[in-house]
Image (tube, rainbow, N blue to C red):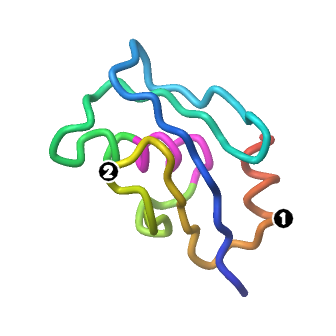
């Protein structure tokens, strides 16, 4: 099984951790923490883990560690499974 990849835009310093929705092919997310010492990245992974109901270890930020726009890889998850989980 191949790994699914998702492009996300993160809005740090928001009032709530929330999945906003898609803007084109990019998923928009809000996280409370500031982009300092990887805190926003940690909150991003935690938010996606809770929203998609998958383990944090199955996700990896493959690019954009210090950018608002990131590419997330989901290990052992097809694109169809990812889209189904996002739409639940």
| Residue 58 position within the rendered picture, expressed as x and y whole percent measured from the top left | 49, 69
User: How far apart in space, not on screen, are marks 1 and 2 (Cα)?
Assistant: 28 Å
**Number of numbered tags placed on the structure image:** 2
Q: As rendered, which of 43 and 37 lies closer to the eye?
A: 37
Q: Indicate yes or no whether the magenta region holds residue 37.
A: no
Q: Is residue 14 left or right of residue 21?
A: left
Tell me the crowding category of disc 1: few under 14, some 14 to 19, or many 20 or more residues within 10 angstroms, Cα based.
few
> What is the crowding at mark 2: few (fewer than 14 residues within 10 Å), some, or many (at least 20)?
few
- Range shown magenta: 44-53
Question: Closest to the observer: 33 or 67?
Answer: 67
Disc number for residue 66:
2
Residue at the far left in the pictured view:
37
According to the picture, the residue beneath numbered tag 1 turns out to be: 80
By secondary structure, the bulk of the magenta-drawn segment is best described as helix
Q: Secondary structure at mark 1?
A: helix
Q: What percent of the width, then of the height, locates residue 18? A: 53, 26
State the image quarter where residue 24 is shown: top right
Give me the residue at 32% from left, 39% from top: 40
Relative height, residue 24 to residue 55 (above, below): above
The x and y percentages for residue 56 are 43, 59
């Amino acid at each position: 099984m191949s790994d699914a990849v998702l492009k996300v835009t993160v809005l740090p310093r928001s009032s709530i951790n929330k999945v906003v929705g898609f803007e084109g092919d990019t998923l928009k997310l809000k996280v409370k923490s500031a982009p300092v010492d990887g805190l926003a990245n940690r909150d991003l992974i935690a938010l996606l883990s809770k929203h998609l109901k998958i383990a944090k270890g199955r996700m990896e930020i493959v690019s954009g560690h210090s950018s608002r726009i990131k590419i997330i890889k989901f290990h052992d998850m097809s694109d169809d499974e990812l889209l189904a989980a996002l739409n639940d």
